[in-house]
Amino acid sequence: MKRCAFDNDIRCGNCIDVMGAMEENSVHLIATDPPYGIDGMDARWDDTKLRQKANKAGVVGGLPVGMKFDKKQGEDLQAFFEKVAEQSIKVLRHGGFFIAFSSPRLSHRIAIALENVGFEIRDLYAWHYTRAQGKAFGMEHFVRKMNKSDKEKQSILEKLGGRKTAQLRPQFEPIIIAQKPTQGTLIENWLAWETGLIDLNNTTLNGHTPSTLLHVEKPFREKYNRHLTVKPVALMETLIRLFSKEGQVVLDPFMGSGTTLLATRNTNRRGIGIDIHQDYISLAKKRLEEQGAQPAIGDVASSARTSSMER
């Protein structure tokens, strides 16, 4: 396959500010894995402490720990994401899609935020994988710390019967499919903007036409890649082929380690990636350069790097 001549465009800064400076109706597709408001991050979505916890997580293994089942966490995520959605709907072409990964228990917050600014929720896909560790916690550790006699503790444990917290081994991640309203009919919108319809003719995943259940195993990260939630390049390639065409612009406002940009390069699209942290900018650049891409590195004013939730 012949590759396009243009390079990936990487921009360091708060995605709300960066998108605010972008031209309206200039992006054909937004595909991203936004932060979910995991408890334990600092005010700049710094995952250093969280990664340290993950290394000591025991039964949780490499998964982030410290996640609170707190209504306010979801409310804060929704309020933040509405600001992201406001800028996203501005830069997207009419009929363009917004594809957002999320955690199962917070996906509704992202969907509501998108709806509140004018997006239409079109579907919900599931990224299915099998390589994951259980998250349920047993109660023995907590019982042993109780101020009771050993006999009383043993009695409590027998009554609990080995029960654990309500967290089954995860095997899917929801993908919200939202769309900016079209101008006129779907045909009229496509003729004007080349967005709003999907391409099933040239898109396969594991040799099959994609369905709403997308099975791709979790990727093995490069040794230097410290990102906690790396997505499979093949999965992103499939979504990009479905919702855009060659030569179009695909934006990832939360670029992380650059998987979306790798996928846009592999599918002959122009990728724009935004991240607030310079270390992820460097990481994405390294991944792209290792696989033959030559990203153009941009920047915005340092005063823009103050988002409370961007990674």
Image (cartoon, rainbow, N blue to C red):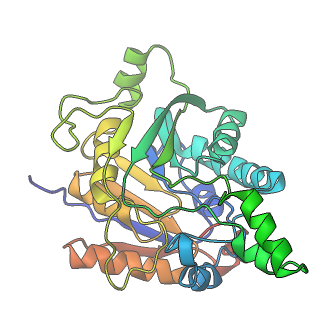
Examine the image and state in which quarter residue 258 appears.
Answer: bottom left
Residue 24 placement (x, y as % from top left): 55, 44
Residue 10, compared with residue 222, is above or below; it is: above
Residue 36 placement (x, y as % from top left): 63, 58
Residue 177, compared with residue 35, is above or below; it is: above
> As drawn, which residue projects farthest toward the front?
151
Residue 72, compared with residue 182, is above or below; it is: below
Q: Is residue 1 visible?
A: yes
Residue shown at the point (25%, 61%) measured from the top left: 6
> As drawn, which residue projects farthest toward the left?
1
Residue shown at the point (66%, 32%) measured from the top left: 118
Residue 57 placement (x, y as % from top left): 58, 78
Q: Nearer the viewer, residue 75 or 19?
A: 75
Quadrant showing the C terminus: bottom right
Q: Nearer the viewer, residue 134 or 196?
A: 134
Residue shown at the point (49%, 72%) measured from the top left: 228
Is residue 4 toward the left or the right of residue 167 in the image? Answer: left
Number of marks? 0
Residue 15 placement (x, y as % from top left): 60, 62
> As drawn, which residue projects farthest toward the right?
147
Residue shown at the point (83%, 54%) measured from the top left: 72
Is residue 216 toward the left or the right of residue 132 in the image? Answer: left
Is residue 137 toward the left or the right of residue 71 in the image? Answer: left
Q: Is residue 25 visible?
A: no
